[in-house]
Amino acid sequence: MGSRAAVPKHLNFITGNKNKLAEVQAILEGVIELRNQNVDLVEIQGTVEEVTLDKARRAADAINGPVLVEDTCLCFKAMNDLPGPYIKWFMLALGPAKLHHMLDGFDDKSAQAVCTFAYCEGPGHEPVLFQGRTDGKLVASRGPTVFGWDSCFEYEGTTYAEMDKSEKNKISHRGKALDKLKVWLASKVDA
């Protein structure tokens, strides 16, 4: 008797961020149907992995079904990987025009964008993590400021905001994490 795939026909992506939803839909197009639900979840403090795992469990309980959740970090080498999963709060306080000033006192402007997705089959199931990382540096804002810190994160001379969306999706932390998810989904379907 063959093993049955535990992957649903669609994924409930839990986010209230329209830009993030559009980017994930573009990357997963043709792979799996993505449905969006905006569920207000309590977010614990901890590593990005701890935060994402907890978020996946809470989301699966909240909708009583399979979920995909995501957490994004921006880690500064000069600050021992802070602000990490707390970048959202720094962005809200400083905005893209002032974010680069966080590293004014440091020579090292290197940064790593980290995206961690978690898939949880449903309540009581252990989530599976998929993580992507892209090395770059923190710079003064360049390009459109419509998507988080994209205008402040430079990869090989160009900020995410200055890139064509399809080009960004090929090299970004989110694209890399979703590539791992795609491989995992394919392995479950072929099982």
Image (tube, rainbow, N blue to C red):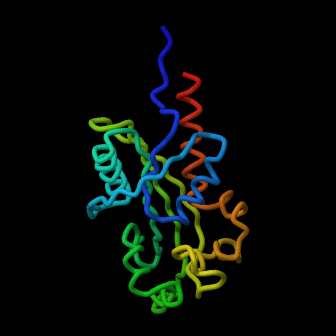
Instruction: Name the residue at 51% across, 39% down.
Output: 10
Can I make out residue 136 in this image? yes
Front-lying residue, 137 or 188: 188
Position of 147 with respect to 64 (left or right) is right
- The relative height of residue 3 versus residue 54 in the rendered view (above or below) is above
Position of 37 with respect to 155 (left or right) is left
How many numbered discs sit on the rendered protein?
A: 0
- Image quarter (top left, top right, bottom left or bottom right) of the C terminus: top right
- The relative height of residue 120 versus residue 22 in the rendered view (above or below) is above
Q: Position of residue 1 (x, y in %)?
A: 48, 7
Instruction: Name the residue at 47% across, 52% down.
Output: 36
Front-lying residue, 32 or 51: 32
- The relative height of residue 121 versus residue 87 in the rendered view (above or below) is above
- The relative height of residue 103 versus residue 26 in the rendered view (above or below) is below
What is the residue that sits farthest to the top in this orientation?
1
Instruction: Name the residue at 61% across, 55% down.
Output: 175
The image quarter containing residue 32 is top right
Q: Position of residue 162 (x, y in %)?
A: 70, 76
Can I make out residue 80 in this image? no
Position of 147 with respect to 73 (left or right) is right
Instruction: Name the residue at 33% across, 45% down.
Output: 63
Q: Position of residue 178 (x, y in %)?
A: 57, 49
Q: Position of residue 30 (x, y in %)?
A: 66, 42
